[in-house]
Amino acid sequence: MDKLLYERELHGAGYKYVCGVDEVGRGPLAGPVVCAAVIMPTDDIIEGIDDSKKLSAKKREALSGLILKKAVAYAICRVDPEIIDEINILEATKLCMKNAVESLKIKPDFVLTDGNMTLDISLPQKSIVKGDSLSYSIGAASIAAKVYRDALMDEYDAEYPAYAFAKNKGYGTAVHIKAIKEAGICPVHRKSFTKKWH
């Protein structure tokens, strides 16, 4: 399968800078939603780019280093739990993606987003369901976002050790839910996601 199909088609149509955007962390009970926007060169391909969920943590970290080094431009943004609680996770994800695109040092000519998202941006865009598996640029963005967010959750683990964030990355595992029931929530929890346990 050609993961550069979308990018090559867009280049052929005259779009020079094609940006891939993806998010990580829509489902967790704690921590921010994180989005990455990347413009990747298509003449110097990194092997192994795929949906970040299909890769081991070690592989993701190695690939993320290469992606950030080779990217023509990249930006990683986050929207924190307070905002998620205020505007809901879908709107927070769209805001995060928009911020990432608008933070790129080089303005893209076309934006590819993962899933089914229409962003409030003035640039031409296309959303691709399962884009992180089908598009090289979106796959690269998914890896960069995941590695950034996982590192952040590891930092929160040191700050709030009761919740095992280093292991669960904020997702609602049995251990995490038990900790919420026993210790209540901490400042990085999403109140709108944890209502039923505290």
Image (cartoon, rainbow, N blue to C red):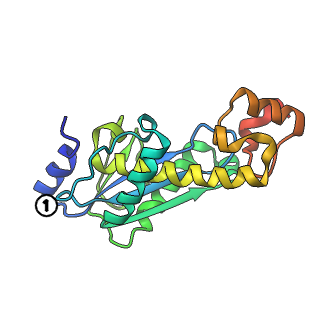
Which quadrant: the N terminus? top left
Reply above or below: 79 against 25.
below
**Rendered view: 144 above or below 175:** below
Quick one: SS at disc 1? loop
Q: Is residue 176 left or right of residue 149?
A: right
Q: Residue at x 18, y 44 (%)?
A: 5
| Position of residue 158 in the picture relative to residue 39 (left or right) | right
Residue 178: quarter of image: top right
Expressed as whole percent of the image width and height from the top left, the position of residue 100 reads 46, 61
Q: Is residue 28 visible?
A: yes
Q: Which residue is mark 1?
A: 14
Horizontal and vertical percent position of residue 197:
82, 31
Front one among 77 and 50: 50
- For badge 1, the amino acid type reads Gly
Asked whether residue 22 is in view, the answer is: no
Taking the spot 10% from the left edge, 55% from the top edge, the residue there is: 12
The quadrant the C terminus occupies is top right
Name, please, the residue furthest toward the bottom: 105
For the residue carrying disc 1, how many other residues have a C-alpha within 10 Å: few (<14), some (14-19), or many (20+)? few
Q: What residue occupies the far top of the structure in this picture?
A: 174
Q: Position of residue 24 (x, y in %)?
A: 51, 45
Q: Is residue 9 left or right of residue 113?
A: left
